[in-house]
Image: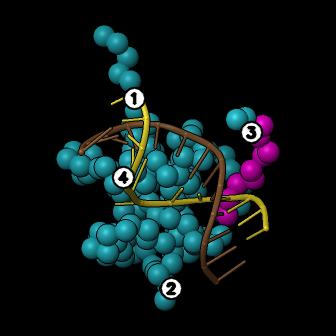
Chain colours: A cyan, B yellow, C brown
DNA sequence: CTCTTGACCACTC
DNA sequence: AGAGTGGCCAAGA
């Protein structure tokens, strides 16, 4: 059989499934860990498209947007969905501050066993050749 | 096939 | 602090 073409979204889902309970990650990080840096948007799209089986499998509530350098926030547009996400996280003992932010120093998942300097906000962005 | 629209992010004024 | 821009991919009209 032909190798199952794993879509980009499946790649994201695979990473997200590894996020442990009580920890969170940001869209940008998930993108990096999936081997597709700078595709943060697509992580969001992939999650927005979650349905059926994947909806149960993937802990979508543990993926949030970034706010400032060490904080994550709910970025789901639908207020209902956002409320659900927050509730699910609080149930996992993840704490939100008055501004609705999560401190990544406390609750940020460091990543899938990838060696990473103790730097929580944004890894170095090596100047890559920008091709056009 | 083209066009639009999405849970984003980092960089620049 | 807020607005603009480029980057990236998939699905549906």
Q: Quadrant of residue A120?
A: bottom right
Label 2 or label 1, whichever comes before in sequence order = 1
For residue A99, the mark is 2
Q: Position of residue A106 (x, y in %)?
A: 56, 72
Does the segment drawn in magenta span residue A48? Answer: no
Badge nearest the viewer, 3 or 4: 3
Is there a contact, CB below 8 Å, between mark 4 and mark 1?
Answer: no
SS assignment at label 4: helix
Q: Identify the mark at residue A47; answer none if there is no mark.
A: 4
Q: CA distance from mark 1 to mark 3?
A: 27 Å
Q: Chain of mark 2?
A: A
Secondary element at image label 3: loop
Are marks 2 and 3 in one subunit? yes
**Mark 4 or 2 closer to N-term?**
4
The CA distance from mark 4 to mark 1 is 16 Å
Residue A93 point in image, percent of width and height: 40, 75
Q: Secondary structure at mark 2?
A: loop
Q: Chain of mark 4?
A: A
Left or right side of C6 for A95: left
- Inspect this view and state whether residue A92 appears: no
Q: Nearer the viewer, mark 2 or mark 3?
A: 3
Identify the residue position indicated by label 3 in the image.
A130
Output the chain of dot 3.
Answer: A
Q: Secondary structure at mark 1?
A: loop
* Magenta span main SS: loop
């Amino acid at each position: 059989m032909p190798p199952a073409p794993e879509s980009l979204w499946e790649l994201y889902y695979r990473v997200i499934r590894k996020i442990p309970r009580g920890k969170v990650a940001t869209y940008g990080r998930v993108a990096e860990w999936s081997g597709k840096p700078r595709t943060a948007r697509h992580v969001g799209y992939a999650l927005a498209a979650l349905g059926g089986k994947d909806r149960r499998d993937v802990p979508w509530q543990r993926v949030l947007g970034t706010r400032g350098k060490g904080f994550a926030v709910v970025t789901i547009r639908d207020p209902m969905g956002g409320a659900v996400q927050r509730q699910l996280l609080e149930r996992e003992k993840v704490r939100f501050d008055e501004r609705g932010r999560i401190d990544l120093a406390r609750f940020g998942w460091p990543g899938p066993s990838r060696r990473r300097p103790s730097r929580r906000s944004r890894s170095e962005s090596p100047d890559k050749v920008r091709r056009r």
